[in-house]
Amino acid sequence: MSPSGAEVLRNIKSQIDEVDPREVHEHLGNGVVLVDVRETEEWDTGHIPGAKHVPRSYLESRIEGAVGDRDARVVLYCASGNRSALAAYTLRELLGYDNVASMTGGITLWKDRGYEVDVPAAFTREQRERYGRHLLLPEIGAEGQAKLLDAKVLLLGAGGLGSPTALYLAAAGVGTLGIVDDDEVDLSNLQRQIIHTTDRVGVPKVDSAEQAIAALNPDVEVVKYRTRLDASNVMEIIDGYDVIVDGVDNFPTRYLLNDATVRLGIPVVSASILGFDGQLSVFKPYDGPCYRCLYPVPPPAELAPSCGANGVLGVLPGTMGLLQATEVVKLVTGAGEPLVGRLLLYEALSATFTELKVRRDPDCPICSRSPEEISDSEMGVFPDYEAFCAAAG
Ligand SMILES: [Zn+2]
C-alpha cells in the first residue's frame, strides 16, 4: 500500500533539518539566506524582512538566481512549515544545497511570536501587468520595482545618450525623471536621439522628451529644467536625486558635476561617445574613484568632443545609453555589482569590450577630503576651457 501524503511529509521532515523561528530570528542577517517558497499572492501579503522569494513551483529554475552559493546556510519557510520542508528536501537531494533547513510553523508561527513582517508596496492591477517581467526576477521583484517607482533619477541632456536612457528608465518604471536640457530638437539630432520625432523639430527637447515619456508610461513624473547646468544652479538642481545620468558632452560641466555630486554623495552613471567608441563608469562618491581621480586633467584638446562637431555612429549612443540605464536600475534596486572602480570601453568597429580597473586617488583634489571641506569656490575649477579648445585649432 502506498504511504499517505501525511506519512510522506512526516518521513521527509524526519530526514531534513528543521529550525524554530526564534533561532531564525536570532541569526537574521548573519550570513543566513532566508527564502520564502510561498506563491506570489501570499508573499505580497507580507514576508520576513530580507527574505528572498522563490515560489516552490519555480524552485528548481530560480533558486540559483537567488542563492548562488550552494554551501550557504539556507533557511526556507512557507505558511506553516510543510511546503518548506518538501522544498528543503528537494534542494538538498536534487540541487546540491547541503546546508539547508526548513523553519517550523512557517510565517504563521513567526507572526505569532511577534516578529517583524514586511508588507510590500501595493501595485495596481495595471502595474502588476506592466512590470510583470520585473516582478518575476528574484533580483528585482516587488521590492525592487517599488524602489524604482520611488526613485528620482536626473538625466543631464536629452540628446544621444539621454534619449535611450530616458525611454528605458521610463519603461522600467522609474517614478521621477528629471531632465536638464536647454536645446531644441534639430533635424540632425534624429539620427540618434530617438526620444524625439520629425514632427517635433524646433520643440524644446525637454518638452519633446516629456511627450514621449508620457505616451510610454503614465506612472512617470517628468521634471523639466530648460537650462544648462552651471555653477550657479548645479547644487539646487541635483539635490534630492538618487542617481544622476551624465550624458554631457563637455569637460567643464563634467568636473562641476563631479565636484557637486561628491559633495552631496550622489552616484553618477557617466558615459561618453566619440566616433565608434564609447566609455562607461559609475562614480559612487567615497565608494570608488570620482571623475577627477580618473581624469585629474582634461584629455588632450584635440580629443575633446565638445571642441567642435564630431561624427558619431548613430546606434552607439543607444548601446552606451542602455548600459547607463542598466547601471541605474542596478544602483536603485541593489541588484548585482555596479560598475564602480571600473571603466568599460566599447569599440563598435571591432565589437570588443575592455574593462580597466580604476582606483581612488589618495591625492584627489576633491574626494580625498570630506564633503564639508569642499567649498563652492572650488567646484568645477578647471583650466580656461576656451583657451584649451582654441589650442586644439
Ligand atoms: Zn576623486
Image (spheres, rainbow, N blue to C red):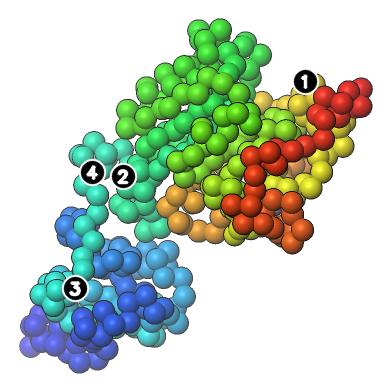
Label total for image: 4
Q: Amino acid at mark 4?
A: Phe
Q: Quadrant of residue 81?
A: bottom left
Q: Is residue 335 visible?
A: yes
How many residues crowd mark 2 within 10 Å: few (<14), some (14–19), many (20+)?
some
Residue 251: x and y in percent read 74, 34
Where disc 4 sits, the SS reads loop
Residue 260: x and y in percent read 60, 42
Residue drawn at point x = 42 percent, y = 64 percent: 65
Q: Are marks 2 and 1 in contact (CB under 8 Å)?
A: no
Q: Amino acid at mark 3?
A: Tyr
Structural distance between the alpha carbons of marks 3 and 2: 30 Å
Q: Earlier in the sequence, mark 4 or mark 3?
A: 3
Residue drawn at point x = 58 percent, y = 44 percent: 261
- Give the residue number, with chain letter if any, for mark 4: 123
Q: Nearer the viewer, mark 3 or mark 1?
A: 3
Q: Nearer the viewer, mark 2 or mark 1?
A: 1
Q: Quadrant of residue 127?
A: top left
Structural distance between the alpha carbons of marks 3 and 1: 62 Å
- Give the residue number, with chain letter if any, for mark 3: 115
Say which mark, if any, is on residue 132: 2
- Give the residue number, with chain letter if any, for mark 1: 309
* 342 relative to 193, above or below: below
Q: Are marks 4 and 2 in contact (CB under 8 Å)?
A: no
Left or right placement of residue 235 versus residue 147 in this view: right
Quadrant showing the N terminus: bottom left
Left or right placement of residue 122 versus residue 218 in this view: left
Q: Earlier in the sequence, mark 3 or mark 2?
A: 3
Structural distance between the alpha carbons of marks 4 and 2: 11 Å
